[in-house]
Image (cartoon, rainbow, N blue to C red):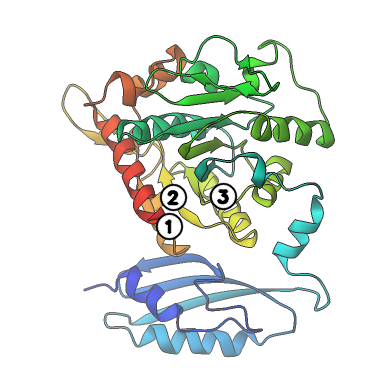
Amino acid sequence: MPPKQTDILSVLRRISVPGGQGNLVQSGAVEGLEVDGATVRLTLAISSPVPVSTADLKAEVEREVGAIEGVERVEVSVQVSLALAHAAPPAAQAAAAVKGPAWADRIPGVRHAVAVASGKGGVGKSTVSANLALALARQGRKVGLLDADIYGPSQQMMMGAHGRPMGDANGKILPVEAPGGVKVMSFGYIVDPDQPVIWRGPMLMKALEQLLGDVVWGELEFLVIDLPPGTGDVALTLCQNVPLAGAVIVTTPQDVALIDARKALHMFRRLEVPVLGLVENMSHFVCPACGHVEHVFGAGGGQRTAIQLDVPFLGGIPLDPVIVGGGDSGHPVVLQHPESAAAKAFVEIAAGMVERLA
């Protein structure tokens, strides 16, 4: 019987990273893990403030992994980058990159702020954000949805939250309540949809601060924040200024998407934001005529990546035209087709996220 990835990762958790940065799994040093029959292939990437012997590390990994039942051969590749000893830790460097007032006290009443992120665009992050918010609302929870993608806002359309935000007596902004009971705020309400937002960093940060601090959310159990793709200014500033309960990473099964998803995950770890789990969108397609399952973009990439990076795999979402049509028409699948397989997948992902927070 071939060895299990979970057994291999358990062994790797007992091996310390040279330089005292935790174990190989916790530090994110496991870049690749492949089981081919009785052969285990590992790719490790180590960042150390001092020169380290790759031969010693390889020997230890080969010895410990080779002792697992079913393993006959271990192939280890180790890449080492030298981090300057006097440099600040990654989290401290990130914290120093953006200075400004903390906004935590400007969103009172929000119990859990959860960021939904992706390493690249086009993986369905906004679709997951919208349906995740609605799945939480279906559980009877008070939920808000903040579209923090300043350059490409879409939640006002995807949620069917038409109209304009109103102001209160204190000059604050009242979010729009969408069908399904989710409060929505998006920069799309403010700008002309045909006009590009051509802004540099300071104006972008000011807009984000206003979206967070000048909106009267009221009492919310969850505020789902739809981040722009990548690991740029908005994500960094948000992590610094808002006490996030956690982050959900969205990817597709494709290797190119998984590479970027890993970067987003490591960003949150460096900023000390808990990663609640990984979601694989466009996981598979089920033929409506015969029921055949086709893995259009590959099979199991999200789950393998979650195992390698030691984060929960919250679930896979099928590739379904109903999801696409629902987002374009403002009738998300969780609201419009609650009995569909896609809607049930979102509900299960929401339940898994809540369990992680608990």
| Nearer the observer, 145 or 268 | 145
4 versus 213 height, above or below: below
- The disc placed on residue 306 is 1
Q: Which residue is mark 2?
A: 278
Tag 3: amino acid:
Leu
Q: Are marks 2 and 3 in contact (CB under 8 Å)?
A: no
The N terminus, quarter of image: bottom left
- The disc placed on residue 326 is none
Q: Secondary structure at mark 2?
A: strand
Give me the C-alpha separation between circle 1 and circle 3. Answer: 21 Å
Q: Residues within 10 Å of mark 1 (few under 14, many from 20)?
A: some
Q: Secondary structure at mark 1?
A: helix
Q: Between disc 1 and disc 3, whose residue precedes?
A: 3
Q: Residue at x 53, y 44 (%)?
A: 113
Q: Between disc 2 and disc 1, whose residue precedes?
A: 2
Q: Are marks 1 and 3 in contact (CB under 8 Å)?
A: no
Picture coordinates of residue 125, whole percent (x, y):
50, 35
Picture coordinates of residue 11, whole percent (x, y):
40, 81
